[in-house]
Amino acid sequence: MPLVARTAKPYTVRELQRTLYRAAKADPGRRFHALYDKVYRRDVLEWGWELVRANDGAAGIDKQSIADVEQYGIVRLLDELAADLKDGSWRPLPARRVFIPKPGREELRPLSIPAVRDRIVQAAARIVIEPIFEADMLECSFGFRPRRSQHDALQVLVDEAWGGRRWVLESDVANCFEAIPHSQLMSAIEERIVDRQILKLLRAMLRAGVMEDQAVTRSDTGTPQGGVISPCLCNVYLHRLDRQWAERGHGELVRFADDVVVMCHSREEAERALVALRAILSELGLTLKDAKTRIVELREGGDGLDFLGFHHRWVRGNTPRSRHLCFLARWPSRQAMARARGRIRELTDRSRLRDPVEKVVQDLNRFLRGWADYFRYGNSARSFDKISLHAINRLSIFVANRHQRKRRFGWWVVARQSPDRLGLIDLNGIVIPPRPYRPRRRER
């Protein structure tokens, strides 16, 4: 009997997380000791499965995909996982190691793909432990946290620049997910959790290792990127950076996972911030990525910076009413624009000529909606015009190729003959420019 697909978190799981969060918030010194039985609770495992299925993803080393697991039987699988967790016999398989290109660079990013059944257990463990650590997280942290988004972090940059902090230190933690020491990470976890079975479960996940070229390697560092629980564990560890920064740092820290920006009033303050950041990370066994570390002054006509997919620059208003004002504007970065164009090219490639035009338009619209939903919160009108024109051009070429005609035929069909460009969505008029001290946009 298949499980009923859910679109919202079950009430019992929400109540469990609220209870854990409130208990942790009420007593910052409390160490939780009775959590393991919550991990194999049926509602927690079911919601863990829903999260894994929604994220889709590739198969692990057991070659079982989401579809294979559904064919095997979700109820049957969850029963087996619950039994294995309860009697302590569950052991994770090594993750499958793949390398994916970093956008706009020749460098490759290592990605570890656990088996689907292991991803379900990781999701269940995250459901239980995340509210406890969330109660301790500071305002400067934004990445992979409930009810916090990239736009919340971006709003801080607008607010601080408007308030006078226009010297910016930008950097990120080098190889963060692969470099976190297991011993220090477990020490950070034990500040809040003393349940031996939970700690054993987390150690097993960390020590599962990765399989590459038919060989399994294990390390005493890293929360492999690609694991469901890895972002949570990364935040738990980097919370130590946030705490130390509150005592020893200079300027306003904005951290999104391992991406770091510090807003300062002067170059001297930014240089002190860099020294402090290097020192704190060194104590944590981490380093900054030198190639991405720099200090930028936000000034009219000066350089800008890229952060969370946007390019940020200090500009002057271009209308009579705003010409006396300077402010921090943002629009999609060059890399973001290149990725968007590349994706549109993929969706309209010649290899899809057998697909109906309606299907290609549907796929284009799905991508454009998602891309625009993120980048609309910026000064992105010109960028949207460029991406819209590129999508029309590529669709025109696709139509022409499908009919074995010249490109101008495709343009005539899409832009002239069709009143709605064959159903391709219009991105005009949806941009929302940032404003200082605007309430943060909350993700549902």
Image (cartoon, rainbow, N blue to C red):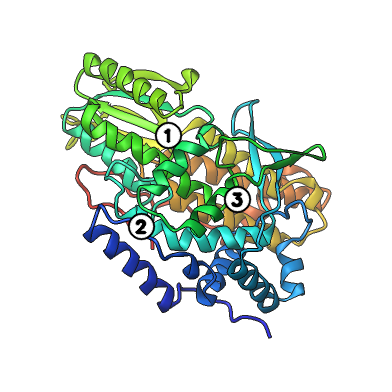
The residue shown at (38%, 50%) is 149
Alpha carbon distance from label 1 to label 3: 28 Å
Write down the residue under mark 2.
Answer: 132
Which numbered disc, 2 or 3, marks the residue that appears first in the sequence?
A: 2
> Does 72 appear above or below 275?
below
Of badges 2 and 3, nearer the viewer stands 3
Number of residues whose C-alpha sits closer than 10 Å to that of mark 3, classed few (under 14), some (14–19) or many (20 or more): some
Element marked by disc 3: helix
Q: In the image, is residue 71 above or below residue 116?
A: below
User: Is residue 353 positioned above or below 11 on the image?
Assistant: above
Q: Is residue 310 left or right of residue 368?
A: left
Badge 1 amino acid: Asp
**Regarding mark 2 in the picture, which secondary structure is present there?**
helix
The outermost residue toward the bottom is: 1
Per the image, the residue denoted by label 1 is 259
**Residue 299 can be seen, yes or no:** yes
Residue placed under numbered mark 3 in the picture: 204
- Residue 381: quadrant of the picture: top left
Q: Using the numbered discs, state the Cα–Cα distance from disc 2 to disc 3 in whole angstroms.
A: 20 Å
Q: Quadrant of the N terminus?
A: bottom right
Q: Position of residue 184 (x, y in %)?
A: 45, 37
| Label located before the other in sequence (1 or 3) | 3
Residue type at mark 3 is Ala
For mark 2, does the 10 Å Cα neighbourhood hold few (<14), some (14 to 19), or many (20 or more) residues?
many
Image quadrant where one finds the C terminus: bottom left
